[in-house]
Image (tube, rainbow, N blue to C red):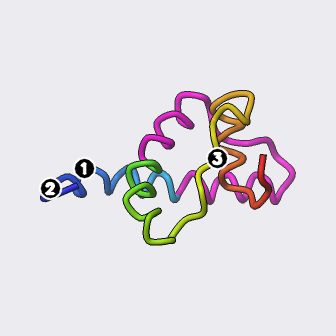
């Protein structure tokens, strides 16, 4: 993204960070995932915008396919765990 594109991505990056921490706290305290399907879908768009440009530099491991999970929430949950689907 050139120029001002990153400015529009910054709020999404902050939301993604908060969502990952909320998920981590929920899992650590035995609660269910706080992610909803609409939120997971939107966060995946943000995550893809951030991760894909950096993947070629080895910053992230290979992508997993969404077909490996039952739905958007399960897919997002799998992305923040260390387990592969």
Q: Quadrant of residue 77?
A: top right
Residue 42, percent across and down?
46, 36
Q: Main secondary structure of the magenta part?
A: helix
Residue depth check, mark 3 versus mark 1: number of the one nearer the observer? 3
- Vertically, is 27 above or below 71? below
Q: Which mark is residue 8?
A: 1
User: Which residue has dot 3 on it?
Assistant: 64
The quarter of the rendered structure image containing the C terminus is top right
Neighbours of disc 3 within 10 Å: few (<14), some (14-19), many (20+): few
Q: Which residues are magenta?
A: 18-46
Q: Is residue 31 magenta?
A: yes
User: In percent of the image, x 41 and y 64: which residue is there?
Assistant: 54
Q: Is residue 31 left or right of residue 77?
A: right
User: In percent of the image, x 62 and y 60: which residue is there?
Assistant: 21
Front-lying residue, 55 or 33: 55
Mark 3 or mark 1: name the one nearer the start of the chain. Answer: 1
Q: Is residue 75 magenta?
A: no
Neighbours of disc 2 within 10 Å: few (<14), some (14-19), many (20+): few
The quarter of the rendered structure image containing the N terminus is bottom left
Q: Is residue 8 left or right of residue 66?
A: left
Q: Secondary structure at mark 2?
A: loop
Residue 50, percent across and down?
40, 56
Q: Secondary structure at mark 1?
A: helix
User: Which residue has dot 2 on it?
Assistant: 4
Front-lying residue, 40 or 79: 79
- Vertically, is 82 above or below 40? below
Q: CA distance from mark 1 to mark 2?
A: 7 Å
| Contact? badges 1 and 2 (CB < 8 Å) | yes
Neighbours of disc 1 within 10 Å: few (<14), some (14-19), many (20+): few
User: In percent of the image, x 44 and y 41: which residue is there?
Assistant: 45
User: In percent of the image, x 51 and y 59: which residue is there?
Assistant: 17
């Amino acid at each position: 993204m050139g120029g001002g594109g990153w400015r529009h991505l910054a709020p999404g990056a902050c939301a993604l960070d908060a969502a990952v921490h909320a998920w981590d706290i929920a899992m650590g305290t035995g609660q269910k995932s706080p992610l909803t399907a609409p939120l997971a879908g939107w966060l995946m768009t943000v995550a893809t915008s951030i991760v894909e440009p950096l993947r070629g530099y080895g910053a992230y491991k290979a992508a997993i396919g969404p077909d490996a999970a039952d739905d958007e929430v399960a897919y997002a949950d799998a992305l923040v765990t260390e387990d592969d689907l």
